[in-house]
Amino acid sequence: MEIDSAGDDTDPVETIRVLREQLELLEKEHNRKMIAKMNDFQRNVHLIHGKLDKAEKKVEVIKRKKRYNRIEIQAEIDKNERLKRENEVLAKDEETLVEQNERTERSRHFLMQQEVALENQIVAMKREMEELSAENEKKSSEILNQKDEIIALKRQPREIKLINYDNKVDYLGLESKLFYKDVVNKLERDGIASLKLSPQEGFQAYHSANFTRQSYKTIKKILKDHQLPDPFPPIKGIISLERKVASDDVFTVYQSKGVKDEGKIVTVAHLNDVAKTVSERIEQLIDTEKLTLDFDKGIWLTNLGDKGGQEVKLCLSIGNVDLPNSCHNLIPLGVFDDEESSEALLKHIPTVIDQLNNLKELKITVNNTELLIPVDMFLGDDMKFQYDMLGHQGASATNPCMFCLKRGRIKIRDYKRGERTVRRTEKSYSDASAKGSAKTTVESVKSQSSFVFTGISLDHVTIPSLHTIMGVAQGFGFDNLLLWTTTMDCEDKALKITKADIKQSRVRKSNLINLQKTVQMLDVELSSMLTVAVVLQHFQDSTLDGTDETERAACPAEKCLYRDRSIGKAPLFDARLVKCETCEETSVVRLCVPRKLHPEEMEDMENAIDTMWLCLQEFAADDNVTPELYALLEHVMEFVETHHTWAKTSEHPIEAFHAAYNTSKLRYRTTRNDLLRAKECFKRCLINNRVFDLS
């Protein structure tokens, strides 16, 4: 400890002196201890030799006298063994002393090396101090010269008026109204301080706050009138970015006739070059470090189509971002105000469909290097859109499943999970379409139909997570709850309730069960209410004040009956918190996340589906297996096990996209020209993509 504290001294010379003194003291102390231990060792050796001689003499005496007392002989032998062990211990002590001596020598050698190193440091520090002294003398002379120049300039009787102080900072202190403003501008030009938004940042702020040209100019004028720093870039920079992101060359707006009503004028807006737009978007995501290639098959793209309001929107979702299910992440491919059908898509935006079918890879430029990235294309949105894109008749068909030939309209109690069924393929769809006619269909496939998106296989059709969960929850959960509550609230017990306003058989069965339970609980209710009366009497007699601050989970009610222990005698009432464990086990929604699922999460999802199915068999056995429920039971886990996710790109964003598009329509509602209004709304969608990438 003394050596360490000496080494921490700030003066190297004093440190070396202290170390030398300590080394000498250690050597003296060590030599003294070694001499003392050697003397003790020699004395012990002499004593042992003396004891051995005496023992040998005693043995000789015993032999001569021929006294063979076994006990004494054994005692002497034990003494000899103890003496031998002591001799061995002394030998080990000697070895220990030798090792300590060697360690002392090594420590001495280390201290000598440390001394040499410190001497070298002292030499280097002296050399550095000499260099610093020379440099300080040089700077001192320069400072003196500058002071002389400043004094000489101040003595000159002339008025100085400067606009740019970049190279004239020597005049600090003279009268100037623009000096500090120029200093701040200089700091900004040198990158030391940021006082103004860049064009991209201004572009983001402009469109995130929904500014107009007039409101933007008004804000800049107010800042200028009050002589406040203006952080916003010129409007020209924002307009330039708008033209770059959503120029007239990027998309086309035109009018055509309706699919069924040829007298209807349909306004259509669509992208001109899908591959180029998507590639530029990918490059922008790379520049902003927003692209996350968490899947190994390339860029995850999902086609989403839906009708909201008057317009049908076809969009493309990029899954390789942190928020893929944001409506502003959707690239608008085509928008038209006609019916939602495959015929309308093929008539109004055929070039977009062809480009999507030929989109196998993307050519992007990163660091002046062209790269080819493969595309993994999926078909998303709700089942209605998917049925139409595949040529399927729909959910009411004989074979409602789009993945297999399972027949529909099966009761839950009669349905068996996991049965082998004939799987649909791209070829089976084509063959069934060719065999069908206008009057008859084969395997619920429309006659003379085909896949609209030929580049998407069946295993890349995403089962809609939002509509599936909502459909199952509504059909088998909320509808049953509504049935039960309506039955309980119905005053006319003899009223026949049909399936349309809640099934009659279930009402009668529920009433019968309730009556049986009521009869069984009469005695329990009577005794429980008597107990409640006693507790209320306690409140009236002020034996309870209705408050209990000592309990951590105290009830906020003014008069809580459970504060009286007497309420425990009422079997009808229970103060315990009831938690539905089944609802916790069937929490499938929490696993519908836009990311790659872990194996444990996929196992949890499968277990949740199994638990949900058991509950449906128990409480909804008379209901039919809907297409959504069938897809959830049989095909969701197949998709999850193949792609390690279910809701990477779901139908959530297209539903929110309708609201965003309606907001744009509301903004340009005064524009009477339909083409111009559609152009501005489509441009706003493209601008939202860039704002999403920058935010």
Image: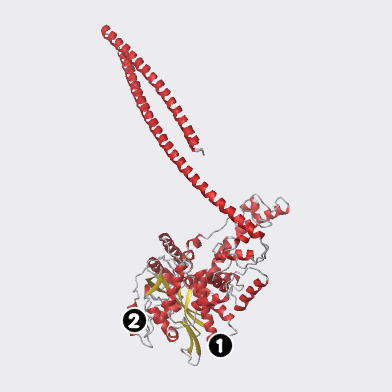
Residue furthest out toward the right: 541
Q: State whether residue 68 is above or below residue 112.
A: above
Q: Nearer the viewer, mark 2 or mark 1?
A: 1
Number of marks drawn: 2
| Residue at (58, 60) in percent of width and height | 521
Residue furthest out toward the top: 65
- Where is residue 46 shown, x and y percent of the image? 35, 15
Q: State whether residue 665 is above or below residue 287.
A: below
Q: Nearer the viewer, residue 347 or 608?
A: 347
| Residue at (36, 22) in percent of width and height | 90
- Where is residue 371 shown, x and y percent of the image? 37, 70
Q: State whether residue 241 is above or below residue 46.
A: below
Would you say residue 312 is visible in this rendering? yes
Would you say residue 621 is visible in this rendering? no
Type of amino acid under label 1: Asn
Pointer 2: what residue?
A: 430
Secondary structure at badge 2 equals helix
- Where is residue 559 shown, x and y percent of the image? 68, 56
Q: Nearer the viewer, residue 14 or 436?
A: 14
State the separation of the CA atoms marked 2 and 1. Answer: 43 Å
Q: Quarter of the image holding residue 511?
A: bottom right
Type of amino acid under label 2: Ser
Pointer 1: what residue?
A: 673
Secondary structure at badge 1 equals loop
Q: Nearer the viewer, residue 679 or 247?
A: 247
Crowd around label 1: few <14 · some 14–19 · many ≥20 (10 Å): few
- Where is residue 566 shown, x and y percent of the image? 64, 51
